[in-house]
Image (spheres, rainbow, N blue to C red):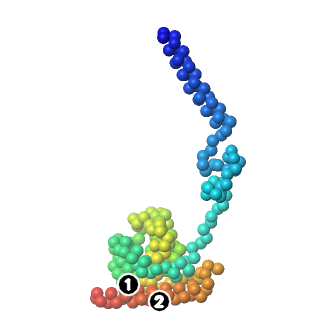
Amino acid sequence: MGELFWNKVAGAVLAIVLAVLAITELGHLLVPSHAAHELTAENTAYPVDWAAIGSGPSTEVVEEGPTDYGLVLAAADIGAGERAARRCAACHTFEQGGANGVGPNLWGIVGADIASHDGFSYSGALEALDGVWTYEALDAFIENPSGYASGTAMSFRGLSNDDTRLELIAYMRSLSDNPMPLPAPLADAAPAEAVDDAMGAMDEAAEDVAEQVQEETDGGE
């Protein structure tokens, strides 16, 4: 086996590699490949039952309607909201007449003018906001403080869990001698009688919490 033999072997191997590469490239040109999210009935080689495999192209757009605060807050667990508020205790107090801390006292915050608590120095971002703390405004602010009021000094990143956030708002609503009325439920959201019952129960729970807070305040004097 001389040098000529091994040259022939090397040439044959190189020819095979080039042939494989050429065939692969030709295949890509003749049959374009697609990522999974690009597959459609037009660019698959055989019929596919997309519904059966639970994937494939979908033109359906899922739209979420507005939050029905009248319904969800009436049904929210105030006790769970009080527990959620404990994570805020490092910066806020919740009892009537409580001192300001890193953040303002939050008694009566629902329905109050934004950036209006006596004795607290608010950031310019909050002072620039008009209006009152409606349920919708509180919901948006608690979910993402810096997104709602860019430049706010509040370092809390927000509550992303919808249920926890609404329970917290329901609890804060109860911290008032005259809780802000709940909005009327959206049309066809729930039977009127069920909503009335839920709102009545929530008002009773709010009164109980207010009385409990008042008793604790009186006992500490």
Residue 146 percent location from the top left of the image: 46, 64
C-alpha span from label 1 to label 2: 18 Å
Residue 215 percent location from the top left of the image: 34, 90
- For disc 2, the marked residue is 204
Q: Secondary structure at mark 2?
A: helix
* Image quarter of residue 216: bottom left
Which residue is most to the left? 221
Mark 1, other Cα within 10 Å: few <14 / some 14–19 / many ≥20: some
**Which dot marks residue 96?**
1
Left-right relation of 215 to 33: left
Q: Nearer the viewer, residue 129 or 12?
A: 12
Q: Secondary structure at mark 1?
A: loop
Look at label 2 and name its amino acid: Glu
Look at label 1 and name its amino acid: Gln
Q: Nearer the viewer, residue 173 or 98?
A: 173
Residue 79 percent location from the top left of the image: 42, 80
Q: Residue at x 70, y 50 (%)?
A: 47
Q: Residue at x 69, y 47 (%)?
A: 46
Q: Residue at x 63, y 48 (%)?
A: 38
Left-right relation of 170 to 27: left
Q: Residue at x 60, y 46 (%)?
A: 35
Say whether residue 198 is visible. yes
Left-right relation of 206 to 71: left
